[in-house]
Amino acid sequence: MAKYGGFAVTIARNVQYPEVRNDLLDFIKTAGNCEGLVIYFAGHGEVRKGELFLVVDNTNAEEFLETSLRCEEITLHLKFCNAKNKLLILDCCNAGAGAKDIRAAGGVPVSEIVQSESFRVFAASEMFEPTREHERWGGSFLSSVLVDQLTQRSMQSVSDVEAECRLRAEEHRTRFPGEWVSFPFVYGQESGRFLLSLPRLKNFPKKNQRITSEFWILIVRTCKGS
């Protein structure tokens, strides 16, 4: 996303609690009034008493609440963040549970209004639905579609990627009925188009040219996959 979307990419190096929580909340706070903010979590998600918890490298069953990330805390901080466009990507099992507070607007077409705020959650699966990695994709289904769309096509919005995910998921279920793949969903409001990839114009950006709009992304990938 640094090359094709103009994002300033940060990869979480210490994916243990509480360090990863502190780094994540500091990242949201530091982003301030940026143009676009993306947080991408790839790992395992577990639902307990209706809440989605993101499992990190040192999460253990005996101290689950003290060693896992509560997704609701992340969405709360994102709601109060002043970034114009905010996107939380949950590439994990039970991901839909992380959008329970904003899912009412999911799937509803929104008119494109430039210069308006949007906050969306891109969930790899529904609540109580597993996801999987496969050699066919070189990882997860959602990550493979994201990589293809951002590297092969320009001007890709969140909605564009969601539509491509659904198309490929339907094709996969038809071709490989024995291999289950979840339908990724996008929940929340989108005002205008939050582009994840830049236009492919000749000599753009020019060598060593900085892109003026600020786009930030934090990638959190745990050792405990889906």
Image (cartoon, helix red, strand yellow):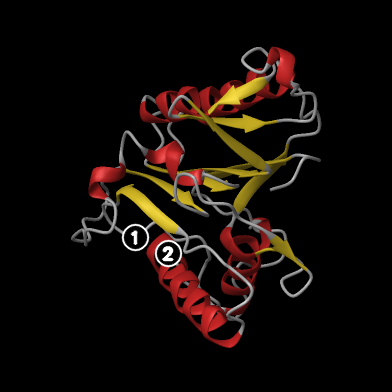
Is residue 222 left or right of 218 when viewed as pictured?
right
- Identify the mark nearer the N-term, 2 or 1: 2
Local secondary structure at mark 2:
loop
Question: Label 2 amino acid?
Answer: Ser
- Measured in 3D between alpha carbons, the distance from the residue under mark 2 to the one under mark 1, in whole angstroms, is 6 Å
Vertically, is 13 above or below 6? above
- Nearer to the camera, 82 or 138: 138
- Residue indicated by mark 2: 157
The N terminus appears in which quarter of the rendering? bottom right
In the rendering, at what x and y percent does residue 33 appear? 43, 32
> Residue 193, which numbered label?
1
Q: Residue 10 occupies which quadrant of the picture? A: top right
In the rendering, at what x and y percent does residue 50 appear? 43, 29
- Nearer to the camera, 109 or 28: 109
Task: Identify the residue shown where x is 26% and y is 52%.
Answer: 191
Q: Residues within 10 Å of mark 2 (few under 14, many from 20)?
A: some
Contact check, label 2 and label 1, Cβ < 8 Å: yes
Q: Residues within 10 Å of mark 1 (few under 14, many from 20)?
A: many
Q: How many marks?
A: 2
Question: Label 1 amino acid?
Answer: Arg
In the rendering, at what x and y percent does residue 193 appear? 34, 60
Local secondary structure at mark 1:
loop
Task: Identify the residue shown where x is 30% and y is 38%.
Answer: 102
- Nearer to the camera, 17 or 207: 17
Task: Identify the residue shown where x is 77% and y is 40%.
Answer: 224
Extreme residue toward the front, this view: 178
- Nearer to the camera, 41 or 150: 41
